Image: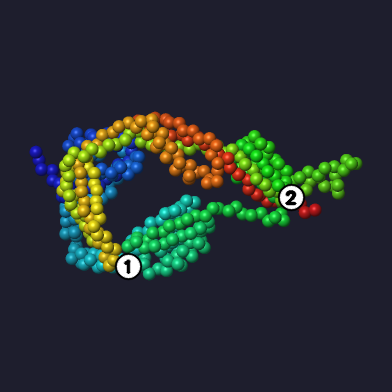
Amino acid sequence: MKNRGSFLEHSIIIKIEGFDRQKLLTECVKRGIIIKDIRSVSEIETIITLMKWDYEQFLRLAKNKYKITVLKESGYRPFIRKTFFKKSTIIGLLLFALILFYQGTFVSEIRISGYRSYSEAEIRDNLREAGLYEGCSKNVDLENVKLHIYKELDNIAWIGVRYMGNLAEVTIAEGTITPKLVDKSKPCHVIAKKEGYVENTIAREGRIAAEPGTYVKQGDVLISGIIPIASTAYGTPASGMTERYVHAYGEVYAKVPYRLFCYQEKYNYIKSPTGNHIFGIRFELGGLKINTVKSFYKYSNSAYTEKEILNIIRPIPLTLGLAKVEEVEVSKKEKSNEELKKEANRLARNIISEKVPENAQILNKSLSFSSGENIIGVNIMLETLEEIGEKKEINNWKHN
């Protein structure tokens, strides 16, 4: 049999996106394509490592059913090609050593979390305006950065910025958006801020415009700030007035329907150790990364574990860990109804926390399932009781 080399010689890390990825991996094993480091990132994403010379055959097997992305190449072949077949190699190595030495004084990555109403691009643009961006010096004043964000972005309750090595971690907590208040001296309506079926209306000032059982849409008047004036005994309105304007307020509770949808895997994937394993070390010094177990083992399916022994950030980032790779056999088992319901309820709790207000009372909840080839669709039907009223000034009122 022809020597096909090793992962240490030239390997690539690729991301597979699509459904029924296990079928593709099984076909690769049948064709003699050696795969390692199989990691399921999400329900539709898997990352694997294979040898470079198997890549063309892998693409032929994948055809156009999957999206394939090459994430990284490693091994001594690409390293030699990049290092020794270029001009000014010695100068480049010296510059690399200099950059490695000084990298601890610069921000190489910014990680942002906690935002909801703003996009990451908007937040990054404002951080750049404040002087914090990837590649900037870590001498930037973080208090000024936070003050700039408070000033430029509305509804920010709290912002934290801290350095973790070359990483700048930005955490944002958004406050509850408070609607613009209507001056109490001005007349206004109470309108619906979302659709629903009116359950109860408490009008403390103004006239009820939506009786219980009425279906209202966003913007419909719930409590009117326009009150008709009763006629006098002679049949003529007082002072020629037919209505008066008030500052309406009160509480309107409505039943609000929600229809939400999510997916879950149809199968549980079981990894059974075969007893074969290999130990090694993971060593990182600045931009130099070495992992011996990922370079020497040839298991088709494996599980990777690591125990960190040393992690130093300053003056130069240094990490040392003891790694272990176990060969495993992967099998799949269809989830039971109980497992499907348990997972569906977990997914439902997560999506409800994102879509439904915290103060909403859940009246009814139902789950239904739709089966696909490898996934289960979960339909979530909710009925909540919420306060849906908000004030809106009457713009065309007349002073009398």
Relative side of 12 to 5, left or right: right
Residue at point 39%, 37% (across, down): 343
377 over 231 or under it: above or below: above
User: For mark 1, what is the residue?
Assistant: 105
Q: Report the Cα–Cα distance between label 1 and label 2.
A: 62 Å
User: For mark 2, what is the residue?
Assistant: 246
Residue 123 image-quadrant placement: bottom left
**What amino acid is labelled 1 in the image?**
Thr
Residue at point 58%, 40% (across, down): 385
Residue at point 80%, 53% (across, down): 400
Residue 361 image-quadrant placement: top right
Q: Earlier in the sequence, mark 1 or mark 2?
A: 1
* Label 2, residues with CA under 10 Å away: few <14, some 14-19, many ≥20: many
Assign the N terminus to one quadrant of the image.
top left
The percent position of residue 215, horizontal first and vertical second, equals 63, 36
Point out which mark residue 154 bears.
none
Residues 380 and 47: in front is 380
